[in-house]
Image (tube, rainbow, N blue to C red):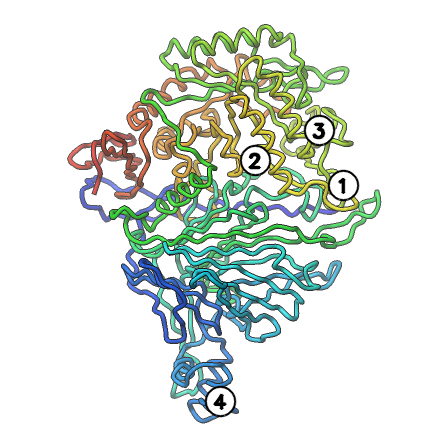
Amino acid sequence: MLQVNKKVINKIISASLITVLSAGVAVNGSYLNTNRDTRKAPERSKSAMSVSSAFEKIYESDKVAYYYREDRDIFAIEDKATGYVWKTGLDVPFKKQVEDAKDAVNGEGHYTVERLAEKWKMTKVQVREIANTPIEESMNEQYTGIANSLISIECFKGSGESMTTTTYASASYDDKDGDSSLEEVSGSNGKQWKLNAVFDKAEIGVEVMITLGDDGSINYNIPYDGISGKGIKKLSSISITPFLGASGGVQTVYNEKEKDWTDLQKKYLTPGYVFVPDGSGSLIRFAENTSKFSDYTGDVYGSDLSSYMYYYSALDDSVPLEDPVMPVFGVSQGDGTQSAFVAYADSGDEFMTIIATPSSTDKNKIRYTYAYPKFSYNTEFYQVTNQAGDAYRKTQDKANEFDIDMTYDFLYGDGSNGELAADYTGMAKAYREHLIEEGILTVKEDEEGDIPMRIDFLMSDSKKGVFGTQEVAVTTTDDVKKILDKLIGDGITNINSGLMGWQKNGETLAKPSDWKFSKDIGKKGKFKDLMKEFSDKEIDISFSRDFVSINSKMINYYGNAAKHLNTQYLTVDKSKVLPENSPVTDFSFALPTKSANWLTSLYERISDYNNSITVKGISNTLLSSHSSTGPTTTVTQAINLYEKAFEKIKKNGATVNMDSPNQYLWKYTDRYLQSPVGTSQYVYETDSVPFLQMVLNGTMEVYAPYSNFSFYSQADMLKMIDYNISPSFVLTQKPSYLLASTTSCDYYSTEFDQYEDLINTIYTTVNDVLSKVKGCEWIGRKVLDDGVIANEYTSNDGEKTVIINYTDEEVTINGESVPAQSAAVIEGGVN
């Protein structure tokens, strides 16, 4: 049987004990950092790149100057105010170039300095500079080309089980592997350029339209129509400037005595980090790692399961990895006050993978930390040939057709001059501003008062019965009313709720668009009365539904289920995580067309009860579907289907609650449910940061994961305050053990009577702090010392700072004491 390749999470906690205290913070003890925390800013960078004579200035504004080096395919961007320089590639010579130049300078070999200068189209001085340049120790000629190049392509080679991929760079050592030329777009006054990259061996040509911004940004646009040649059908991916912002490296220096390159020399390790959108946000600090790590590979919006190697997958009890919900990453160099860039895609994001490679001293690894975007045009998979499961490897018959639009914004300084800070907070603000400009996010007026709380209710599910299945009701409409009334009596009045498993047959077996109620939980009239009563109390109760996950006992797959590239129905085996007597263990995914139709048709009925809906599945699952003649729905078309469906219900004034929505749906989201508060915790990830929450701040309500499930400690409450997210719970009236034989068995602790006190404790703790900055703009976040965070907010009334003290000791900030394991709001900023 074909086996499924699965990502396995390595959870290794690394910690360091740091006792140096920051000015203005009095700490009596020390705090042990893990990669669940945010550490203090890196050290200041002591080194900066320079622009050599090999670069030609091609454009400048009042703020920046742009240079280009033709032989290495590299742009240099110089900030005029600070003199800081970024280069789109490493800007290093090929090993053979260095050797030939050294031979020429020494009067050896086949070439003189003059002949090499003519051959390489450079000056004799530049040839001598190359002769005195150390050789990159961990790179061969192919990787040197990739490290310099503006773009590189990956192509499939061979067929069947012998199929491999080969990478070609636009500035390769061998021109047949890759070569390029840059030409100015007529009438652009130096702001727009076209890179013509030709990959003869791959039989592919790529046109890259480049726009140089007056503000210091660079935009790359690669239209699908700009990709040509017979090799397109074998094109796997295109990557852009993979070594922009790379840190690390080891070189071999020429030994005059030995007459050879024998002396190893480490390059300066620039302090800083890579930011990747793993979970809430993760930092990978630049370091010389002795272990060999796999790359961080973040498939934006999650993997398209229909394009996996196999149509069949299985779940186990491993901790799931976090998928990026936004197409953005960045690099910060120095202490967060020097320079950074944030990069994001406005087109092609549904085919985008963010890759970050940690440095490693392993002899087979590149000794740099670097990050870049890769866009997939084709994929390999197993084509099943018969019912016995025999299969062979192949690629798609036709490449994915899409345009790439990628922007890099460069940031400089500490943010005090009105510019954005050169750290992850500045990246978040830059991306937020961009999304607001694009109309994807809209700042909403938020009145002062208590923060909201999310209380979801699981009403019913199904289990195996003596004959067929049996519905298990654990919460009725009357129970919902009693619980909400009790919470209101406890003083929690800003509540919104979602009802799960409200349809006949429960959460798992009810068809997504069914409008049938179970008498065991409440008839139609009961639901209508419930929603009307609490709407009058300004408490929003919505019907909740997953419109993507389906199973064969719920619905016939024919015409409803998505198909893999090999035309088999997608199948997920959950037998390892569900009870043996579960009514169903194999699941599939709905066609995107069906999901969109079910959403709009169900909403039409729901709107008579309450103009609010809670959406799952569609919000964070993006997949295509295929037939024997090709794709029936691409992921791009799926996004368009979902957008049109939400536009339709939003026109009727719907309040939309979404479970971890992907960025393309943020325009329609009023409440972001189940926001991540950490990362996948790869061993090389050094920090967790609230990048996602900073981007969303002030544009929608954002909620924490359910506190029922190990998110209720004092540290967890502080994280809600730190990340500015509201608490949430999922509840039942009856004990959760009644769900043990259903597919809702993972809701293992939900009984309200067990949680009433905890609900009040968590809400009071979080609300006491966040209510004081409700409606304020989140403008900054600092680590004052290990375990001590300062979140800066501003409003028309002035500036406020929320201090979060994760440590076991009292701290003093600006003369005010903040007890251990607590948070407080102080007026003004913190230096």
Determine which residue is flagged by label 1: 568
Q: Is residue 602 visible?
A: yes
Residue 524 on image: x %, y %: 62, 8
Q: Which amino acid does label 1 sit on?
A: Gln
* Vertical placement of residue 228 versus 512, above or below: below
Q: In this view, does 633 lie above or below 268?
A: above
Q: In this view, does 364 lie above or below 252?
A: above
Left or right: 466 as drawn, with respect to 49: right
**Residue 654 picture location, percent across and down:** 52, 22
The residue tagged 3 is: 551
Residue 115: numbered disc: 4
Q: Do the residues labelled 4 and 3 touch (CB within 8 Å)?
A: no
Q: Distance between the residues labelled 2 and 4?
A: 59 Å
- Measure the C-alpha gap from mark 1 to mark 4: 61 Å
Of the residues shown, which amino acid type is indicated by label 2? Asn
Alpha carbon distance from label 1 to label 3: 15 Å
Between 568 and 269, the one lying in front of the other is 568
